[in-house]
């Protein structure tokens, strides 16, 4: 059976050119980047090149890029490192209600250390109102973290407008751009943000790779104490193969992005239009227009996410229900509830996110096999039986 992978938000395959670039650093180019001999300096040059590639992708300066192990570490370093460095100015944070758990839980950790947080609500499309974000700022606010795009429902935030209003209030602005970087143009200068998180496994790089951009002049307190690595902001021997892979993936993502975006959008729209037309009581979640090009998410009434995922998997299709970090628990996601969905609809979440090599035939196959799956599952659903009885009266 052919496998169709529609779970990009969980992971992407390592690009063949990325793997080729990484392999020498497992074998003949294995030196420590901090060593002064030729073997070490050769590796240090490769790390520097990767830093330049990542910087170029988001229009940053190389010295503003700090390599970390993943998006979650980047978010933790941003939240904790920026907030603690700014603690003399105040102890208040502002976050949106739909942030990734690595942002929300990092804020909770800071709350245990004496900080306070304000959560900004979102609308039915998971969008943050820029004015509401600005209004949440207090005199003691030191950091605001608003995501660039939501991985669960695909909504792209009006981040430039949010940052413009927040910068007028004199606060540091961080964005979790893990879901956005590599899929849509992300320019830290145009956005006006002070810090940005990204991860390699969302753009054809290796798992265990990530980076944090911090604008020059913004103070950041290290969270891993060690030596001089990453300009003293992240101690520990560099994971050179992962760093090289991330750099190569960043360069590949940068080139041809618009062509890939257009191709993905066509397939995404085919799915967004086709699924509700073939299955009743299905509706799109997230924004229709301001949406990631590879992302289509729905709420399916009277069916739970787990049963849909398992049934699709038996047909050779990999998908997701809710965010990747909650896919095992399959509880109603905080994102869906923040958008105003009831628990029953939120539990019927299904997310399809396309890889770059997705085809129209893949979408056609999904549109063929998914309706019978839903029909079968609804026949076993007490909620659907009750719904039919109510509507028959």
Image: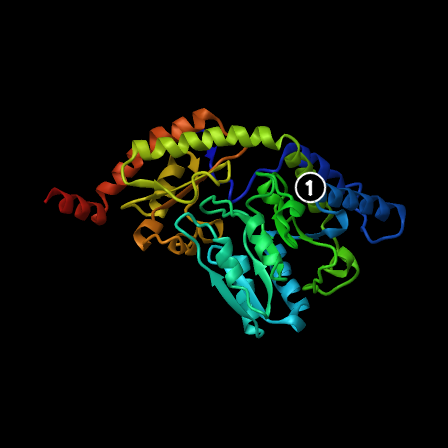
Q: In the figure, is residue 393 to the left or right of 234?
A: left
Q: Is residue 26 visible?
A: no
Residue at (61, 46) in percent of width and height: 207
Relative to 60, residue 275 above or below:
above
Furthest toward the top, the residue is 361
Furthest toward the left, the residue is 393
Furthest toward the right, the residue is 37
Q: Quadrant of the N terminus?
A: top left
Of the pair 62 and 89, the residue shown nearer to us? 89
Would you identify the image quadrant in which residue 51 lies? top right
Q: Quadrant of the C terminus?
A: top left
Q: In the figure, is residue 37 to the left or right of 293?
A: right
Q: Is residue 298 visible?
A: yes
Q: Which residue is mark 1?
A: 245
Q: How is the image coloured?
A: rainbow
Residue at (34, 47) in percent of width and height: 348
Q: Secondary structure at mark 1?
A: helix
User: How many numbered marks appear?
Assistant: 1
**Image spot of residue 153 (x, y percent):** 44, 45
Residue at (35, 34) in percent of width and height: 275
**Image spot of residue 212 (x, y percent):** 66, 52
Relative to 268, residue 332 above or below:
below
Of the pair 227 and 19, the residue shown nearer to us? 227
Relative to 14, residue 348 above or below:
below
Of the pair 99 and 287, the residue shown nearer to us? 287
Of the pair 393 and 368, the residue shown nearer to us? 393
Label 1 Cα neighbours within 10 Å, binned few <14 / some 14-19 / many ≥20: many
**Image spot of residue 374 (x, y percent):** 29, 38
Q: In the figure, is residue 383 to the left or right of 78?
A: left
**Image spot of residue 104 (x, y percent):** 52, 61
Would you identify the image quadrant in which residue 111 lies? bottom right
């Amino acid at each position: 059976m052919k496998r169709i992978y529609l779970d990009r938000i969980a992971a992407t395959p390592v690009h063949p050119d990325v793997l080729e670039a990484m392999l020498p650093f497992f074998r003949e180019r294995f030196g420590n980047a901090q060593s002064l001999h030729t073997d070490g300096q050769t590796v240090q040059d490769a790390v520097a090149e990767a830093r330049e590639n990542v910087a170029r992708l988001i229009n940053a300066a190389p010295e503003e890029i700090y390599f970390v192990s993943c998006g979650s570490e980047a978010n933790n370093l941003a939240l904790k490192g920026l907030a603690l460095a700014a603690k003399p100015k105040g102890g208040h944070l502002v976050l949106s209600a739909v942030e990734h758990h690595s942002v929300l839980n990092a804020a909770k950790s800071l709350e245990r250390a004496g900080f306070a947080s304000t959560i900004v609500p979102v609308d039915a499309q998971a969008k943050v109102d820029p004015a509401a974000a600005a209004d949440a700022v207090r005199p003691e606010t030191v950091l605001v973290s608003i995501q660039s795009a939501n991985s669960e429902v695909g909504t792209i935030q009006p981040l430039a407008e949010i940052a413009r209003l927040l910068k007028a209030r004199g606060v540091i602005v961080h964005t979790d751009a893990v879901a956005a970087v590599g899929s849509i143009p992300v320019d830290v200068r145009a956005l006006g943000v002070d810090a940005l998180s990204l991860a390699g496994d969302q753009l054809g790089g290796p798992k265990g790779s990530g980076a944090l951009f911090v604008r020059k002049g913004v103070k950041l307190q290290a969270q891993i104490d060690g030596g001089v690595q990453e300009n003293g902001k992240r101690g520990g021997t560099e994971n050179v193969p992962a760093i090289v892979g991330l750099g190569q993936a960043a360069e590949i993502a940068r080139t041809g992005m618009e062509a890939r975006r257009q191709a993905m959008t066509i397939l995404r729209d085919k799915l967004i239009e086709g699924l509700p037309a073939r299955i009743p009581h299905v509706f799109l979640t997230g924004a229709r227009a301001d949406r990631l090009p590879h992302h289509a998410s729905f709420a399916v009434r009277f069916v739970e996410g787990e049963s849909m995922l398992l049934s699709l998997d038996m047909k050779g299709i990999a998908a997701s229900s809710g965010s990747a970090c909650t896919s095992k628990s399959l509880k109603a996601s905080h994102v869906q509830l923040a958008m105003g969905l009831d628990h029953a609809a939120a539990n019927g979440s299904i997310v399809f996110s396309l890889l770059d090599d997705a085809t129209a035939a893949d979408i056609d196959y999904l549109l063929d096999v998914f309706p019978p799956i839903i029909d079968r599952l609804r026949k076993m659903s007490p909620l659907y039986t009750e719904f039919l009885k109510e509507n028959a009266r």
